[in-house]
Amino acid sequence: LEASSGEPDAKAPIRPSGVPTTCSGCRKGYVGIGTLCPECKASAVDPLEQEVTAWLEEVSGETRGGKTLRLWLCDGKLLCRVANKIRPGSVEHVNQSSFPFQRMENITNFIKACRALGVPEEDTFSTVDLHEGKDLKAVMICIRSLGSVIRQTVPEFEGPYCGPARLAVLNDGHNQTPATPLPRPAPAAPGDTAAPRTVAPVSAACWQVPPAAQAQASDGKPTASAGAAVKPRPSDGNLEHEVSWWLEVVGGEERGDRCFHEWLEDGQLLCRVANALSPNIVPKVNNSKMPFKKMENISSFIKACRKLGVMEKDVFSTVDLAEQKNLLAVMRCVYNLASVVRTSCPDFQGPYLGHAQQTHIHDEGKRKTMLPGEIAAGGLRRDVANDLRNAAYIPRHM
């Protein structure tokens, strides 16, 4: 007998590893590892996108064709028609114009219809998630959730449905009404430096800034001494209090008795602050009161924050301010901007907030828009999913 060398026979066929299973995409049986068969992996089609597309086509009677998901839905018309098919009158008016603001209004109306039809708040998406392609997976999750909850909330609708049956959320005041403006913060007790950053009512008088606080240097840039000599920096540890003080001094505009959202919603003050930190970093500031122009100002400020070194995790979304989705995220972004400019804007002489930030994470992959083909089945970026998959096959020595 010849001793076996332990080497596999080169002529012997290599059998695929894994166990018999069913593909979650095409529902065909195959032998391998993972939830998708090789054909579905090669086509890079997300099963969730397939399911949502099929449901929208069946309800609306329209075909997607060769369009990408974003191109197919970004004007919001199809989504509004689907909502009205489920429950007539869910969207009273569907804009037919191709202007960006009209398209965003359609998307916003569809989101409101989803809430009214019982979609839980955690499953809804933001307008820019679809219009700007920020998070198409969130859009698909919302549509799938809508196709599921209407089994209960719209009994007169006889289908088709999408996804498994699930419990709907109805009569939820937080779910059905817009967010209320954030109240003013109350100053902490004198000498209480450990006061938590909370939000509570406070009289408008303590927010009045004397005209001298708007003094500027000869180059048009607010100086630290100009603001500090008139209105001392707050020491109560309240985030909204500190951020408002900093914006007043750098932007040269007092808040008065306005709430935080009303003060900043048009984005003009934020853009002026950005230009005070780094001249012309926002080339154009829209003075129009049109909602789309206001959102454009906010988006320009967010881009400026990224350029000035604010980390991606600290940046807020346009709708966080425009639609009062998350005013706390807006405050945190401004607070971090007031900190990072110590190093990113050496010509700016202050004032600053927080501690100096010495690190900056630069990840273009996090900022780029993910196309449907670039998202893996698990919701991760495809390059991240591949890294995780490859790591699973690295031998470990215990």
Image (cartoon, rainbow, N blue to C red):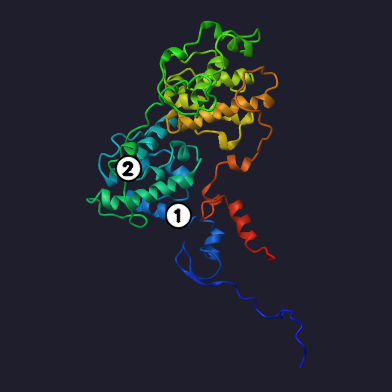
Relative to 398, does residue 387 appear above or below in the rendering?
above
* Residue 61 seen in this snapshot: no
* Residue 95 seen in this snapshot: yes
- Residue at the image position 25 percent from the left and 51 percent from the top: 157
As drawn, the residue found furthest toward the bottom would be: 1
Relative to 295, does residue 8 appear above or below in the rendering?
below
From the top left corner, tell me how far across and down residue 85 is, in percent: 28, 46
Relative to 151, does residue 72 appear above or below in the rendering?
above
Q: Which mark is residue 81?
A: 2
Asked which quadrant contains residue 204, the reply is top left
Asked which quadrant contains residue 354, the reply is top right
Q: Amino acid at mark 1?
A: Leu
From the top left corner, tell me how far across and down residue 287 is, in percent: 48, 17
Q: Secondary structure at mark 1?
A: helix
Q: Secondary structure at mark 2?
A: helix
Of 322 and 257, the residue lying toward us: 257
Q: Amino acid at mark 2?
A: Arg
As drawn, the residue found furthest toward the left would be: 156
Asked which quadrant contains residue 333, the reply is top right
Would residue 5 be found to the left or right of residue 124 on screen?
A: right
- Residue at the image position 28 percent from the left and 39 percent from the top: 90
Q: Which mark is residue 148?
A: none
Mark 1 closeness class: few <14, some 14–19, many ≥20 residues within 10 Å: some
